[in-house]
Image (tube, helix red, strand yellow):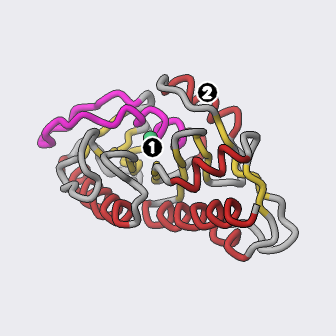
């Protein structure tokens, strides 16, 4: 995603596709992308905003580098020469909104049970404090009040994006979509993975001790 590199090259997009496939297989192995659910993205260009996003309807444990598409700010497909068009996830529009608003370099969306259960118990946001794992999302282990926002689900990505924009906290790199799943992000794909793992751990903890 560095400036000067051209997102329109197949090499760059397929490189992102290979990283996304490897991460997806990891998350699928954790049981966080059941069926064909969930999707991952990586920003391949900031100006104009372009994301490489996992293709829709495929088993996330079996993606290849070619199972990727490039989308613009509204999740619309942007053709890339040398890359066979794949249908992007319907949720690509929200990935793009997250990347635009937060400056994230990568976005993870998984359907974890703990995120949905936590959203059920704390519809106004999941409160967390005084727990070591908060350091994994850039917060303090003590005396730091963290609330993971919860937004209502929608099949309309523009509406969901507006809810995200309204609810998101710049100091919390995750949002729960109620009765749906979790979005988490980071400066790159590896960081986004670590944030996702830590948020999921924190939500599991919150649900377990309530
Ligand atoms: Zn989803």
Q: Quadrant of ligand 1?
A: top left
Left or right: residue 30 versus residue 137 is: left
Ligand 1 within 8 Å of disc 2? The answer is no
Q: Which residue: 34% across, 44% down?
A: 53
What is the span of residues highlighted in magenta in the rendered image? 75-98
Left or right: residue 18 versus residue 206 is: left
Q: For mark 2, give the secondary structure.
A: helix
Image depth: mark 2 or mark 1 in front: 2
Left or right: residue 57 versus residue 66 is: right
Q: Mark 2 = which residue?
A: 162
Q: Nearer the viewer, residue 48 or 197?
A: 197
Left or right: residue 114 versus residue 155 is: right
Whole-Å distance between the Cαs marked 2 and 1? 20 Å
- Give residue 57's quadrant in the image: top left
Q: Is residue 52 visible?
A: no
Q: For mark 1, give the secondary structure.
A: loop
Q: Position of residue 112 (x, y in %)?
A: 50, 54
Residue 93 belongs to magenta span: yes
Sequence-first tag of 2 and 1? 1
Q: For label 2, count other residues whose C-alpha is less than 10 Å away and answer few (under 14), some (14-19) or many (20+).
A: few
Q: Which residue: 61% across, 51% down?
A: 174
Q: Which residue: 39% across, 45% down?
A: 45
- Give residue 198's quadrant in the image: bottom right
Q: Position of residue 135 (x, y in %)?
A: 69, 72
Q: Mark 1 = which residue?
A: 46
Ligand 1 within 8 Å of disc 1? The answer is no
């Amino acid at each position: 995603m560095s400036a000067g590199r051209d997102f329109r090259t197949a090499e760059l997009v397929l490189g992102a596709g290979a990283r996304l496939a490897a991460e997806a297989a990891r998350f699928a192995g954790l049981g966080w992308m059941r069926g064909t659910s969930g999707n991952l993205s990586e920003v391949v260009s900031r100006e104009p905003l372009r994301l490489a996003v996992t293709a829709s309807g495929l088993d996330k444990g079996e993606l290849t580098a070619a199972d990727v598409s490039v989308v613009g700010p509204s999740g619309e497909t942007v053709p890339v020469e040398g890359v066979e068009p794949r249908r992007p996830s319907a949720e690509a529009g929200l990935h793009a909104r997250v990347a635009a608003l937060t400056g994230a370099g990568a976005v993870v969306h998984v359907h974890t049970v703990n995120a949905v259960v936590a959203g059920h118990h704390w519809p106004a946001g999941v409160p967390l404090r005084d727990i070591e794992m908060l350091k994994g999302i850039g917060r303090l282990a003590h005396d730091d009040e963290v609330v993971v926002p919860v937004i209502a689900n929608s099949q309309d990505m523009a509406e969901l994006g507006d809810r995200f924009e309204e609810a998101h906290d710049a100091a919390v790199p995750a949002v729960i979509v109620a009765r749906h799943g979790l979005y988490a992000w980071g400066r790159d794909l590896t960081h986004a993975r670590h944030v996702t793992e830590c948020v999921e751990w924190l939500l599991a903890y919150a649900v377990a001790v309530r």
